[in-house]
Amino acid sequence: MFPYDPIAAVTAPDPYPCYAELVARGGIYRDDTLGLWIAASADAVTAVLSSAFCRVRPVDEPIPRALLGSSAADIFRYLVRMNDGRSHCSLKQAVSATCASIEAGEVAKRSKLWARVLIDELRPLDDHTRLSDFAFRLPVYVIGDLLGVPHIMLPLAAASVSAFVRCLVPASSPEQLEEGNVAAMTLLDLFHAGVDQGCYSDGLLAVLVQEAQRVGYDDPTISVANAIGLLVQAHEATAGLIGNTLVALATRQELREQVMDDLTLLDPVIQEVLRYDPPVQNTRRFVAQNGQIAGQELHVGDTVLVLLAAANRDRRANPNPDRFELWRNDRRIFTFGLGAHGCPGTALAQTIARSGVEQLMLAGLDVEQLAEKVMYRAATNTRIPLFGAHGGNR
């Protein structure tokens, strides 16, 4: 049995039969139980993500009401991924240019360094419950370091990002909202200090400030918010990519043996994991103008659940979609979105995840044993495995 609820499917042991059923319906359809339109096929997902009628936030709620008046809202309101229109286009240019300025070799170098540091804290590696801590902290350490955060402050940054992310969930408890607000204040103070005192002058934060000024945004608060946004986006997506790559290796003996013999194969493995079992399973779009999308008339106020993971498994986009193919031709990946809101940090996430998995294997992690007990972190849109005795949704 498997859930046909596309939100519940995210944390199921195998959500993909559910997605296949939804893809087979074709186009966009209305789920009255959820009160959402559902886009599952590759064509429908492409249509929604490319539509001029859709926005990343509801027209009447640009900032979640639960965050209003908080430091968390002061970050959220400026995040490029949470804005549309002219401000989004110019800020996206600044963020994309900042990400593109990083040399891939430098990202790999720092990723390996911080992976080794965190692995030393994990030992003994047979305690698999601590792998999720490694997966969540690694991207924050690497990107924080690249931004210029002092090394001694990286543990605080990682803890603060984790708390801040929890307050962004629609079902956040009052305690999570308060903890997230405190975390937001900590992150704002940390990055504003870097800008005001010029002590991050040799990091990406300085580049982001310059790029934002180049497109007309002189207020450093906007750059600081989007520096924090880079950490937030990488936090769960990269953690899920690390975990799902480990699951792929743990459950496939031949693949595992190939990779152990040649670690360079981790690059195509991660590419296929992004398609086959992606860390980001869905996103939402909010209709801001009446119009037709993928053959359906949608109206202002409608919400569309965009099933990125289902589109990855649409046979019209990727033939033999349920087969894990290392050398897949013309692989189409919807995981990081497309169009105006395609994620600018895709390459960063892949490099960090690849280095993390590689260093775990070099350190002697028994990957095969990870298949014995895998649960998934409770979430509505991210698929992040928890290994060992962790609680979670099976």
Image (cartoon, rainbow, N blue to C red):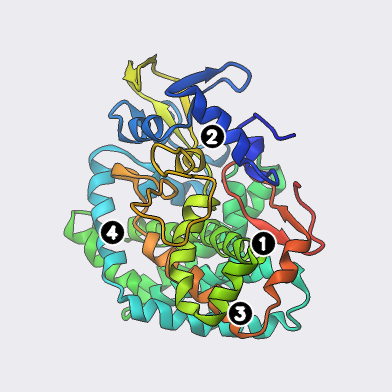
Q: Residue at x 61, y 79 (%)?
A: 361
Q: Which residue is mark 3?
A: 361
Whole-Å distance between the Cαs marked 4 and 2? 29 Å
Label 3 residue SS = helix
- Position of residue 267 in the picture relative to residue 186 (left or right): left
Q: Is residue 236 above or below residue 31?
A: below
The mark lying in front, picked from 2 and 3, is 3
Q: Label 3 sits on what residue type? A: Met
* Dot placed on the residue nearer the N-terminal end, 2 or 3: 2
- Looking at this rendering, what residue extends furthest in the right direction? 389
* Dot placed on the residue nearer the N-terminal end, 3 or 4: 4
Quarter of the image that includes the N terminus: top right
Whole-Å distance between the Cαs marked 1 and 3? 15 Å
* Dot placed on the residue nearer the N-terminal end, 4 or 1: 4
Q: Which residue is mark 1?
A: 251
The mark lying in front, picked from 1 and 3, is 1
Q: Which residue is mark 4?
A: 96
* Residues packed near mark 1 inside 10 Å, few (<14), some (14 to 19) or many (20 plus): some
Q: Residue at x 45, y 24 (%)?
A: 26
Q: Is residue 181 visible?
A: no
Q: Label 1 sits on what residue type? A: Thr
Q: Which residue is mark 2?
A: 65
Q: Residue at x 54, y 47 (%)?
A: 70
Residues marked 3 and 4 touching at CB (< 8 Å): no
Q: Label 4 sits on what residue type? A: Ser
> Residue 326 in the image: x percent, y percent?
46, 62
Q: Is residue 50 above or below residue 355?
A: above
